[in-house]
Amino acid sequence: MSFLSPHGNKSVEATKQKVQGVALGFKRLITPRCCSREKYTEAAYLVYNTRLKAVKVCDGSELQNRFGVFKHSDWIGKPFGSRVLSNKGGFVYLLAPTPELWTLVLSHRTQILYIADISFVVSYLEIIPGCVVLESGTGSGSLTTSLARAVAPSGHVYTFDFHEQRAASAREDFGRIGLSSFVTVGIRDIQGEGFPDEFCGAADSVFLDLPQPWLAIPSAGNVLKQDGILCSFSPCIEQVQRSCESLRTHFTDIRTFEVLLRTYEVREGRMNCGGDNEGASPGSRPSKRRLPSSSEGSNRKETKGGSVMARPCGETRGLWCLMTKERVKAGDIHQKEVVLGLGVNVKNMILLDLVVVEI
Amino acid sequence: MSESKPQNPRITWEGCSVLLDINDGDRLVFARLSPSSTIKIGNKKCCLSPLIGCPFGSLFQVETGLKGPYLLRLSATEAAESDHLKEKDDSQPSEGTKDNRSLIDNNKAQSLSSEDIDAMRREGATGDQIIEALIANSSTFEKKTLFSQEKYRLRKQKKYAPRVLLRRPFARSICEAYFKKHPARIGFMRVDALSLLLSLANVSAYSDALVVDMVGGVVTGSVAERLGGTGHVCNTYFGVTPYPMDIVRIFNFNDQICGRIMQTPVADLCSNQENKNELFISHENASSLEIQPDADERSLLTTCILSDDAILEVQSVQEEISSDSLVKSGSISETFLSSGNGTLDHMDVDTCSTESLDVINEENASPVLKTCKSVKPGRRASPEAIKLWKENGFTSLIIAAPDLDTWKIVEELLPLLSYSAPFAIYHQYLQPLATCLHNLQTAKMAVGLQISEPWLREYQVLPCRTHPFMQMSAFGGYILSGVRICSNKTSHQS
């Protein structure tokens, strides 16, 4: 539950005694205030490697990184969002986990979906609390956590993967982040066998991320409720094309989308009209000043009269996501939906050294 | 009136709000189903009563009967057949055998005159029969490629046998419909931007979400949809007049969900932040007696103006109105009037005459039937709720206020969030968000700051004809997101 309402009454109380569940540590640029000049240099270098990490908090454990040694015992009792110090004066922030942060730190057993696709899929699948959602394959579980968040507290996500070890790891992850009561991981080859018969007519929405989604589409039609929605996510246009052909015999309202997310970097720069662009003014050295928008800007605080500027991040690439929507013909008219997509790595994500905490 | 009774949300009922998709997205109309509501399609006025009790996703075709045009529900097989027709064409795309070199645009290809068609109609021909006749009498139809034959058929079908698809009004479909028809009313927020806001702000069941919604209520409604009757949406506003949130009424929310949507001025949330203990309690308790009936009364007054059916309820409320709140009634009616235009705006959809169908109509202020529920969305938050929020902080913050200074709002509202709570801010323009991000960084109020811009393109995927749609929305807005952290300045929370 910490995932769902990390700041609700219970969690807040819990954090007063012990940090419970998962905390994300956010390594940040060390400011000159809290360490020596040399360290500052080192830290400045690390800005580019700002990382998030999931850490399991146990009394007696330690987190070690280049900022020093962090004792978990120092964290226990602090609210999420706190800054904690290491023995060397470095610091990390302890963040409560959300599906968005989890997506950034989970271990990639497969290519995963990122925030732009995830949010779009959850919206298009019209998932609200109480829904029953079927997913295949589970993969690394990046989407599953968001699906679980959307169906809680009364709904359920049944996710299937044919890879036994992957399914087991995903199950372990969901347990770790407190989602076990909303997610059931099954081992099954959905392309080959289809969804289990017991789900016939039971699903509000189905999500497919399979190499040959068209093989699973007839089964998806069976498990969906009337007016249910199917999304299929595929990386290649040929897969999308073939899926759409198959969908046309079972579904209606087929729509296909491509989704991308462009991120922007913001910096304070000085618009020079000649003269003093030497040395001290950090704004005059754009190569050093180029910070990802997530990084700290404290070392620029002395810049006066600069203007804040934004531009798209050069490396940002989004994901190709094709999405399709439809209605079933057989029996009553159903409405279903499909997302098909092309996955590309997003390079520009802020990588964090993540930390998870357990009592 | 008792819409709260359990019913299948996938089947329409009398008084339910629906989205009508006419001719495959050509026109999108929000309507409220009642025995008397009508819709005008082309020059035909059809009664919406056949839609009551049908499952969402049903397809209807306009047919002309003895008593005039009516909506006929197409059975699954009929719908399938017409689709199948298309599919046969699709399955054997013959490329390059025909082209349009011999087509001459001289308006002589069609030998049927409009008089002939009118005559067919008088004789009771169905839309499909007229289409077949048009095709038979078209001298160029056979010369067309299969693809353009299909296009021709579709065009004629839209004119002579229009179809209406019955859709569930969901955050997604509502946002899409508004974006298509009246983007300015939702601050040009595209559906992918809305989805991102909800995700980035970690909105889920049991959230206590703080929302500044100056986009007609689409954000408030979408958040409430994700809460599913748990947690709270606190729709907050600066000044004394709540922002209109009429779009919330298009969602078919039950009492439980409506009861979770609160409206509270920022001043109430921010008051006594430093000395929240005694001062807060005494002040709030004193005013609670006034505030509560005030809010109820206001919403019921709204109802009574909107609906004759509500008279009974209004009377009962008038008995409850204490002298205290009567004193306030001046300001109440003022509030109502100022938001009144917005309120009436699209609640008249059920009358569905002509223009009124196009998503929203401005002027038509006809009475609404069956919209009064026992719980109205947007009650004033109770002092207990406010106290709870002050103690625990909100779990999410979403701002969609194109007309206010973004940084000023954030500066004021961010401290109301609990630590480690995420926030997401929407804006049409980049600069206010860039400034805000910079200020948040400098003040060390948040981490994980990022400005992102969603990009969305829809594709036509058909055999041999896959391509992006020609028209795409070039712009869906910007989103600044981040996570509030515990900074020294605002360390009043323990």
Image: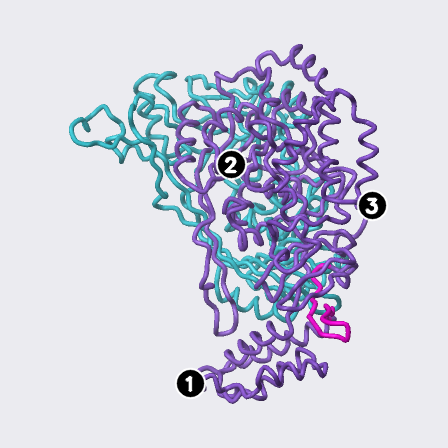
Q: Are marks 1 and 2 in contact (CB under 8 Å)?
A: no
Badge 2: how crowded within 10 Å, few (<14), some, or many (20+)? Answer: many
Helix, strand or loop at label 1? It is loop
Q: Amino acid at mark 1?
A: Ile
The chain containing the residue under callout 2 comes to B
Which residue is at the front of the view, A247 or B381? B381
Mark linked to residue B5: 3
Q: Earlier in the sequence, mark 1 or mark 2?
A: 1
- Is residue B62 within the magenta segment? yes
Screen quadrant of the C terminus of chain B: top right
Q: Tell me where residue A210 sits by quadrant.
A: bottom right
| Residue found 75% across the figure and 27% down from its top | B293
User: How far apart, in angstroms, are the residues tagged by discs 1 and 2?
Assistant: 53 Å
Q: Which residues are magenta?
A: B56-74
Image depth: mark 3 or mark 1 in front? 1
| Residue found 54% across the figure and 69% down from its top | A242
Screen quadrant of the N terminus of chain B: top right
> Which hue is chain A drawn in?
cyan
